Amino acid sequence: MRHSVAYTILFAGAVCVVCAILVSTSAVSLSELQDANATLDKRRNVLLAAGLIDSSRGVSAEDVEKLFKNVSTLVIDLESGETAPDVNVDAYDQQKAKSDPALSREAPPNSAVIKRLPKYAVVYQVLGEQGGVEMIVLPIEGYGLWSTLYGFLALDADAKTIRGLTYYQHGETPGLGGEVDNPRWKGLWPGRIAFDDSGEVVIEVIKGQAGPAAADPHEVDGLAGATITSRGVTNMLRFWLGENGFATYLKNYRQGRSER
């Protein structure tokens, strides 16, 4: 009986069922931990972009949570630039929303190769001791050479001056486009100005070297040997700071700030 075809099939089936139950149970039991780790990682990268933590030093989960208490998370309507009061900030997933036709739309042709735009987007406001906004951190994404780069751009309270830029996910070539992770290159961004006096988005990663921020405010050094990735960074920044991205929100914010 043990060497029969029926026994072999039944035994294999039983093993498959037991393994499936174990895998399913593990996935369910670990899902909360995975979600918590994903949230922690996102918060850590927001703080990195804002310059509130140093990537060269280990930062504990407790430190991240403590610092993030000074960050207000908003969900805004991209088209109106206004806060979306009916959207649960804690439950909303901007990336998942892009695959839902009810929560997204097709993006117009663009150099950043953005295919779909979420109806709502997440914005982080870093608050000072008096409760005022000191920085705005925006999620950005766009195509480089081999992959879509996902990151955060931090703007000063004037919503024009860049405070920091960081990427947390990409598949660019190490040593070339992968240099978007290099602290030296990221250190070139603070103090650059994203817009000109007319409000046009003019920030650009150039081929070669740019001057210091004070003398050359709209340009940043290109990545050596990674022209396409460098161009991709320029394209995504101009897209997300432009009319199809956060331009309306930033305009509303500046207007409200000037009226105070």
Image (spheres, rainbow, N blue to C red):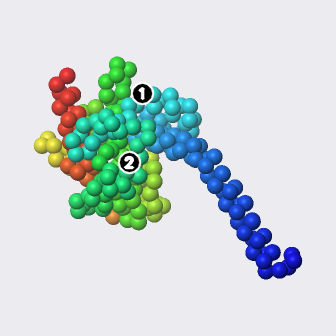
Left or right: where 94 falls relative to 219:
right
Q: Position of residue 106 (x, y in %)?
A: 27, 59
Q: Amino acid at mark 2?
A: Gln
Q: Under tag 1, what secondary structure?
A: loop
**Residue 226 pos. (x, y %):** 37, 63
Q: In this view of the protein, can residue 136 be seen by the observer? A: no
Q: Which residue is situated farthest in the top direction here?
A: 130
Sort mark 1 into few (<14), some (14-19) or many (20+) by Cα contacts within 10 Å. some
Image point 37% across, 51% down: which residue?
97
Residue bearing the label numbered 1: 70
Q: Nearer the viewer, residue 64 or 183?
A: 64
- Seen in the picture, residue 65 relative to 167 is either above or below; the reply is above
> Which numbered marker is on residue 204?
none
Amino acid type indicated by mark 1: Asn
Quarter holding the N terminus is bottom right
Closer to the camera in the image, 10 or 229: 10
Question: From this viewpoint, is residue 168 visible?
Answer: yes
Q: Quadrant of residue 50?
A: top left
